[in-house]
Image: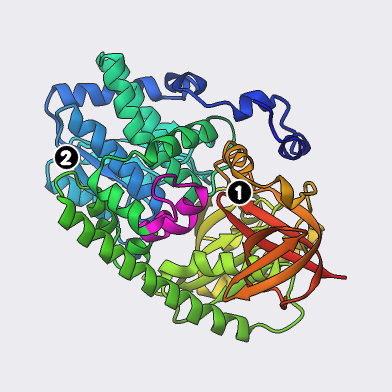
């Protein structure tokens, strides 16, 4: 098929050498051998033994989208294999990772084996306690860490937690001798959750993660799970063809809202296979309400945060919010990055007296984990990945940490970010179904594979309606979302448009 040369130029400009391989429809054979992941073979053998011997297996997930969906994936495959796993998702107030309180709870329930997913691998104290209580543990995770517990770890930084859970499920059923057609059906089902989590968790959408996410997106439109179908109906602009924008701004925020506002188990309930259509609709409705509450909280607290800052904004932001809900700290940090284009960490009081917990987000070119490592003398603990991190510190250390963190960022001499860089020039006459189809082959968009930004010359703003602007070039036109640009009807000039799936977003307008 003849491919639009503009889109080919965009891919070439991103350093993608084998464009055919990047664009062709992926197959399961394009993924790495799941058994090649360190410790996968030992972990698979241990779980198969536990299933065969009727041991009590527990799954410990996390309170965010990746942790919820990773737990669901492990629950799904173990249930299909005849086990009855106990699933535990912590409340955000319990803190991140496997805690000793959870280990005691597992012990009381007679647990033999605990599998953690998306929890990091540095819970030394909890793992040691589990061992003393006769409970084995192993970890499925992708985070970069300070320290490592003495436990089996299926670990890779190249997939999100849910993606690794899917690869673990694949390895499990391969070793169990399932027939190929049954394995493929399982993977079609589970890859849908990996697609959502990969986009939600800011994992670079390259290599195996991109392949798995593309496969999942393909099957998401045909989702058979009642709860997932209801979630798609509530979240996606086109339920017959969800794209990465739907995942990032529709599905994932609703799943995350449960852990941010109340409890992540409310999100996991959506994926309970026992639910009928009416129950699934009710569960998704509850997520919608929590997501709306989350949006209102973020708007309120960000407005207050913005008013509290004075110009000029430093090279990095460290903000302590005395009364801020912990569930929205990461969202506030993201909005700080969006507004001021600097790395940002937002902190609030911890449930432990005298301590603060925080979430950080960063800009292109600054590795957040490396930055925190250079300030670790102020920190009690931290972890995450290059783009996003969580941390805990004594409240009395915040001022010293802020000075050092800002100094670390200043030393990087990051370029000032003003407007996006155009990757090519678009003539509106080129648009149409074929352009949209070919753009869709570049999906999913997100970290590591940003939506293309294209320049459009000599356009006129022909109409404005709420957040939508219609741009005309000759007899051709395009409608785009316009968030915070001061454009008026009748203006003429050049613009930059971001092509994010089926949505076009006006990023800059230069009046002539």
Q: Which residue, as the protein is rendered here, is positioned at the far right?
A: 512
Where is residue 14 shown, x and y percent of the image?
A: 74, 38
Question: SS of the residue at dot 1?
Answer: loop
The image quarter containing residue 96 is bottom left
| Residue positioned 12% across, 41% down in the render | 110
Q: How many marks?
A: 2
Where is residue 290 shown, x and y percent of the image?
A: 33, 69
| Residue positioned 73% across, 27% down in the render | 17
The Cα–Cα distance between marks 2 and 1, rounded to whole angstroms, is 35 Å
Question: SS of the residue at dot 2?
Answer: loop
Q: Earlier in the sequence, mark 2 or mark 1?
A: 2
Q: Quadrant of the N terminus?
A: top right
Where is residue 7 shown, x and y percent of the image?
A: 71, 39
Span of residues in magenta: 235-255
Crowd band around label 1 with a 10 angstrom C-alpha radius: few (<14), some (14–19), many (20+): many
Residue 253 in the magenta stretch? The answer is: yes
Where is residue 353 shown, x and y percent of the image?
A: 39, 74
Give the residue pinned by disc 2: 111
Q: Nearer the viewer, residue 512 or 8?
A: 512
Give the residue pinned by disc 1: 386
The image quarter containing residue 319 is bottom right
Crowd band around label 2 with a 10 angstrom C-alpha radius: few (<14), some (14–19), many (20+): many
Left or right of residue 495, residue 140 in this image: left
Taken as a whole, is the magenta stretch helix, strand or loop?
Answer: helix
Q: Nearer the viewer, residue 165 or 198?
A: 198
Mark 2–mark 1 CB contact (< 8 Å)? no
């Amino acid at each position: 098929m003849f491919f639009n040369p503009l889109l080919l130029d965009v891919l070439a400009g991103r350093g993608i050498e084998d464009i055919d391989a990047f664009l062709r429809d992926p197959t399961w054979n394009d993924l790495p051998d799941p058994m090649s992941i360190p410790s996968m073979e030992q972990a698979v053998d241990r779980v198969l033994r536990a299933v065969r011997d009727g041991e009590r297996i527990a799954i410990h997930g996390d309170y965010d989208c990746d942790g919820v969906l990773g737990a669901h994936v492990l629950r799904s495959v173990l249930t299909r294999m005849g086990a009855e796993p106990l699933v535990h998702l912590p409340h955000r107030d319990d803190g991140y990772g496997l805690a000793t309180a959870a280990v005691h709870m597992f012990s009381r329930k007679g647990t033999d084996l605990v599998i953690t997913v998306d929890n990091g691998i540095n819970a030394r104290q909890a793992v040691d306690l589990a061992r003393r209580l006769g409970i084995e543990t192993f970890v499925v995770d992708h985070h970069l860490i300070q320290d490592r517990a003495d436990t089996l770890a299926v670990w890779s930084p190249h997939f999100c937690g849910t993606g690794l859970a899917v690869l673990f499920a694949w390895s499990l059923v391969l070793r169990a001798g399932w027939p190929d057609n049954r394995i493929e059906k399982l993977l079609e089902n589970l890859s849908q959750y990996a697609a959502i989590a990969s986009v939600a968790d800011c994992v670079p959408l390259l290599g195996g993660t991109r392949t798995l996410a593309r496969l999942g997106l393909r099957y998401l439109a045909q989702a058979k799970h009642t709860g997932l179908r209801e979630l798609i109906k509530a979240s996606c602009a086109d339920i017959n063809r969800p794209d990465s924008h739907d995942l990032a701004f529709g599905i994932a925020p609703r799943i995350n809202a449960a852990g941010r506002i109340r409890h992540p188990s409310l999100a996991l309930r959506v994926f309970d296979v026992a639910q009928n259509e009416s129950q699934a609709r009710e569960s998704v409705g509850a997520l919608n309400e929590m997501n709306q509450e989350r949006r209102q909280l973020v708007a309120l607290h960000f407005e207050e945060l913005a008013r509290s800052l004075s110009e000029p904004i430093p090279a990095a932001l460290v903000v302590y919010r005395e009364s801020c809900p912990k569930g929205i700290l990461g969202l506030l940090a993201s909005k700080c990055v969006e507004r001021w284009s600097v790395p940002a960490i937002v902190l609030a009081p911890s449930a432990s007296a005298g301590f603060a917990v925080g979430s950080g987000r960063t800009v292109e070119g600054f590795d957040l984990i490396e930055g925190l490592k250079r300030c670790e003398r102020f920190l009690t603990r931290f972890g995450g990945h290059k783009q996003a991190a969580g941390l805990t510190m004594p409240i009395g250390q915040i001022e010293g940490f802020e000075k050092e963190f800002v100094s670390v960022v200043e030393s990087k001499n990051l370029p000032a970010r003003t407007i996006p860089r155009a990757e090519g020039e678009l003539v509106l006459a080129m648009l149409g179904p074929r352009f949209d189809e070919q753009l869709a082959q570049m999906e999913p968009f997100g970290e590591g594979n940003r939506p293309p930004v294209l320049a459009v010359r000599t356009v006129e703003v022909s109409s404005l309606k709420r957040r939508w602007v219609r741009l005309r070039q000759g007899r051709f036109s395009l409608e785009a979302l316009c968030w915070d640009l001061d454009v008026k009807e009748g203006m003429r000039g050049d613009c930059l448009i971001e092509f994010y799936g089926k949505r076009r977003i006006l990023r800059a307008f230069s009046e002539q």
